[in-house]
């Protein structure tokens, strides 16, 4: 999974992520008072336009096939470690699970910025995973291939495999007594196992220190989001962080959709079958805090930039969030 138009922002806009080029409330007032955009605000009937899991995956396979055949690739997200510095300064042997890795544009800056981190990356699209492996290899980052473990998974449907965190470790997390996790912290980065090929292999890596959801949750059907977030929480070690960035309500991309492309309230489907949801702060807060996370940071990122191809001003709205899985103390 990948964002469709984030690459259009200028380098300066990426470097000034926290700057507020405009106020979101001002944009909201403008949009909600524009008669030509009223279709974005209307209620929507329930249980409409539901795709099967295979159709979701196939749509993203086709998307990545098209991008590869036309030579279009997303740019490396070099801003990432500026917005989530925890990834750069975390301890030796830290582990990251990138959910919805797409073609590797998020994995690259993480592997480049921290030479001791191990990154597990999943996507529902086989084609995306192939592109990610190719791009990681082509980047020629020291030990990147040895620290990058891609695997196919639709986390919103099947959950994560047991080799990420087994049932025993999940139970241990709730008691703050996870020996598997402690062993993982002591090992060297070369000791992290490859994702097991055989389902009979019941070893696990003891969970991860970070989960990244970068323009991924918006591609998950709304009715599956809560389960998807709960799965992310389940593979995090106690105290682990979930790092979130996604489309915000009234982003330019949302306003481009035609009425017939609506498949839900604030939920849209493109002609290629891929979908996108647009979040407000309250919807993100409800989803994550309702699943047990603690909110650390949550804000709109409002960036105004100019499309160099046509000179048009673009007002982009993204949501930046950091959430922590609570520490659980026995007897507290």
Image: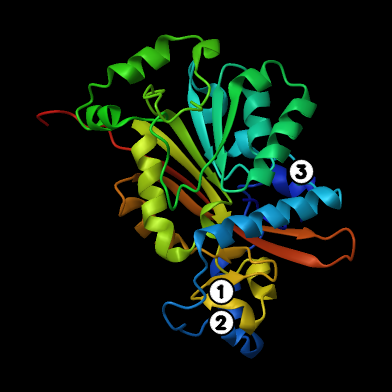
Query: Percent position (x, y) of residue 122?
Result: 55, 39
Mark 1, secondary structure of its residue: helix
Name the disc covering residue 10, or none: none
Q: Residue at x 66, y 74 (%)?
A: 255
Instruction: Name which quarter of the figure residue 3 lies in.
Output: bottom right
Query: Around disc 1, counting alpha carbons within 10 Å, would you say few (fewer than 14), some (14 to 19), or many (20 or more)?
Result: few
Give the mark toward the camera: 3 or 2: 3
Residue topped by disc 3: 75
Q: Nearer the viewer, residue 250 or 101?
A: 101
- In-image side of 224 versus 58 (left or right): left
- Other-residue count near label 3 (Cα within 10 Å), few / some / many at <14 / 14–19 / ≥20: some
Left or right relative to 184: residue 131: right
> Residue 217: image x %, image y %?
51, 54
> Which quadrant does the C terminus fall into?
top left
Residue 28's disc is 1
Q: CA distance from mark 3 to mark 1?
A: 29 Å
Is residue 38 something that shows in the picture? yes
Dot 2 lies on which element? helix
The residue at 64%/60% (across/down) is 59
Nearer mark to the viewer, of 3 and 1: 3
Kind of element beneath mark 3 = loop
Q: Are marks 1 and 2 in contact (CB under 8 Å)?
A: yes
Which residue occupies 69% across, 42% down? 103
Q: Is residue 260 left or right of residue 292?
A: right
Horizontal and vertical percent for residue 46?
A: 41, 79
Q: Position of residue 12 (x, y in %)?
A: 77, 46
Q: Which residue is mark 2?
A: 32
Q: Quadrant of residue 117?
A: top right
């Amino acid at each position: 999974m990948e964002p469709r138009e984030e690459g259009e922002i200028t380098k300066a806009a990426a470097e000034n992520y926290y700057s507020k080029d405009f106020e979101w409330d001002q944009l909201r007032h403008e949009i909600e008072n524009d008669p030509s955009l009223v279709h974005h605000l209307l209620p929507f009937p329930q249980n409409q336009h539901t795709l099967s899991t295979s159709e979701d995956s196939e749509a993203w396979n086709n998307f990545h096939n098209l991008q590869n055949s036309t030579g279009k690739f997303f740019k490396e997200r070099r801003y990432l470690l500026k917005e989530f510095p925890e990834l750069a300064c975390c301890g030796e042997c830290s582990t990251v699970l990138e959910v919805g890795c797409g073609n590797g544009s998020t994995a690259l800056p993480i592997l480049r910025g921290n030479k001791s981190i191990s990154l597990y990356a999943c996507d529902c699209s086989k084609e995306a995973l192939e592109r990610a492996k190719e791009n990681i290899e082509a980047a020629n980052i020291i030990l990147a291939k040895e620290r990058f473990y891609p695997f196919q998974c639709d986390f919103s449907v099947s959950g994560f495999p047991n080799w990420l965190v087994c049932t025993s470790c999940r139970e241990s997390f709730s008691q703050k007594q996870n020996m598997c996790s402690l062993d993982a912290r002591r090992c060297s980065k070369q000791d992290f196992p490859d994702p097991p090929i055989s389902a009979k292999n019941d070893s696990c890596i003891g969970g991860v220190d970070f989960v990244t959801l970068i323009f991924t949750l918006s591609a998950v059907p709304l009715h599956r989001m809560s389960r998807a977030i709960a799965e992310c929480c389940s593979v995090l070690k106690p105290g682990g962080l979930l790092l979130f960035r996604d489309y915000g309500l009234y982003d330019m991309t949302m306003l481009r959709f035609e009425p017939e492309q609506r498949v839900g309230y604030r939920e849209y489907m493109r002609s290629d079958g891929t979908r996108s949801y647009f979040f407000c702060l309250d919807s993100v807060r409800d989803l994550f805090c309702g699943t047990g996370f603690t909110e650390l940071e949550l804000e709109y990122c409002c960036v105004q930039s100019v499309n160099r191809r046509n000179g048009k001003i673009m007002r982009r709205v993204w949501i930046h969030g950091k959430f922590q899985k609570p520490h659980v103390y026995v007897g507290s």
